Amino acid sequence: MTTEQIVQLCVFGVLFVLVTVMGFVASRWRAGATLDHLDEWGLGGRKFGAWITWFLVGGDLYTAYTFVAVPALIFGAGALGFYALPYTVVLYPIVFLPLQRMWSVSRVHGYVTPADFVRGRYGSPLLALLIAITGIVATMPYIALQLVGLESVLRTMGINGSGLLGHLPLFVAFVILAVYTYQSGLRAPALIAFVKDALIYLVILVAIFYLPTKFGGWSAIFDNAASALAKPNPVTGKPSGSILLSPSNQLQYATLALGSALALFLYPHSLTGILASKGRKVIKKNMVALPAYSLVLGLLALLGYIALVSGAKPIVNQATGKPDSNTIVPVLFGHEFPAWFAGIAFAAIGIGALVPAAIMSIAAANLWTRNIYKEFLHRDATPKQEATQAKLASLIVKFGAVAFVLFVDPQFSIDLQLIGGVMILQTLPAVAIALYTRWLHKWGLIAGWVVGMGWGLYLLYTIPNPSNGKAHFGGSALTLDKLNLLGWQPFAGSQVQIYVGAVALVANLVVAVVVTVIARQAKWFNGTDQTDTTDYEVEDGDPKLRPVGQH
């Protein structure tokens, strides 16, 4: 370990200790009567205002993995990596109205999870179970990816062992995270998000103005990046990428951006921050203000081109013997900035892993507690028993994610997250569309989920990745030539690519509609709707709102 790495590690350690103290103090911050209730432990008392919600939701959506993976994708592929920018731009207008409706109906009925809403809307334990399982399975690799981001920073600071000892700092960090999340619940990441976002904004603004001056300005950076990406990949013999989209990947870019936008607030952890807010006005303000993060994301993405021009090389992961592309941005900061500032940047990324990991584990724990444990294992569970179960489940989820990093190639976690995005998109009909209409029949929704999930996973299985030799699950871009509908190939010969999630969602919706028409003609019972039309427009302060902490 070099002198510079020791300085970086010291700065990182000081800031990590600071957020650890904040995590434990958070249990008393804006505290309610007790934390032995999911409203308090899992949703922070449902009373976060505009500023807290902005930091909480922003800290949840813009994760450590985002801050290392988006520039790394641009470093390796070029323009395609910028899909994250339009996706976060179109996201907020799309969800502006649905999230307000979700908040209102959830506050009226005391829903804690999206599966709670589905259970109440359709009276179907089976449909709610499918939504809950989808949310948990899709969230697990997402948590693991936060560890991948944190490990990329630790690896850059010289902690790059090949055995369990090399993972010890990561394990210690997540033990601390597990303990203060267990104690403080959602209040811990909400409070820490203030520090995380302040550090991220500081680091990115300094980097985006300072680094271009070292490499001849943006014009030279783009020219040199274009030349570097045009060089043939030694494995495939084709260019690694381009600073412009090609005719074959433009549809993929558009469908990936739109599909990701539709999927993001279907993730249980994204909805957790919304349900924790105190009113519809808070949500409106946040949907207007959160695009500020998209500006930061766009600036951050440009670091991929700077890294390409700078000559930065990924650090070899001693555990796998392969270069870790996620270390590109940390390596860039380590080379181009003084050690103390690089330490601040590494802390921003590291803390940026803790905030979303905590929220994700809480959201997954809420799903387990409300929609599996209480629904099928202990119907008469008291609020205290629910809270205890959720706390224990959050620990299991966190250490399950650590197990991913310890025993599985981190690249596999990334592949699993791609699968998770396709999976969570299949809950859109039952969660998002149901906020507006109950026309789709519950059996149509179940059949659509089965077909969309099955076909989506099958298509992902058929996609290879020649650059790393993977025959299956090599990405989420499907060549239209490979689209086969019961032997019919409508796009035979086409090399245009499309996002698998979009194809699977279309199949899901078509099947849901067809089965719904059949079910309505046959007059199948469609469950009992616990909600009322007026429940979806209730404002903060309305007497219909269920008091926080009430069973």
Image (cartoon, helix red, strand yellow):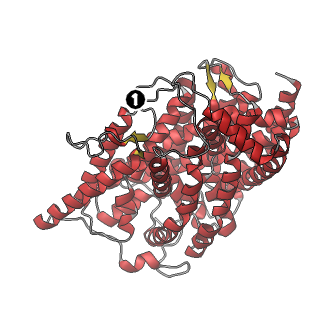
* Quadrant of res 343: top right
Q: Quadrant of the N terminus?
A: top right
Residue 64 pos. (x, y %): 65, 43
Residue 235 pos. (x, y %): 53, 22
Evaluate whether residue 503 shows in this view.
yes
Q: In percent of the image, x 33 and y 66: which residue is there? A: 121
Q: In percent of the image, x 63 and y 24: which residue is there? A: 323
According to the picture, the residue beneath numbered tag 1 turns out to be: 472
Residue at the extreme left of the image, as rendered? 522
Q: Nearer the viewer, residue 472 or 526?
A: 472
Residue type pointed to by label 1: His
Residue 545 pos. (x, y %): 49, 76
Q: Nearer the viewer, residue 383 or 414?
A: 414
SS of the residue under disc 1: loop
Residue 496 pos. (x, y %): 41, 44
Evaluate whether residue 385 shows in this view.
no
Q: In percent of the image, x 45 and y 56: which residue is there? A: 382
Q: In percent of the image, x 47 and y 60: which residue is there? A: 112
In the image, residue 457 sits, relative to residue 188, either above or below, namely above
Answer left or right for 442 relative to 7.
left
Q: Nearer the viewer, residue 109 or 462?
A: 462
Category of crowding for the residue at label 1, using alpha-carbon neighbours closer than 10 angstroms: few (below 14), some (14–19), many (at least 20)? some
Answer left or right for 5 relative to 260.
right
* Quadrant of res 12: top right
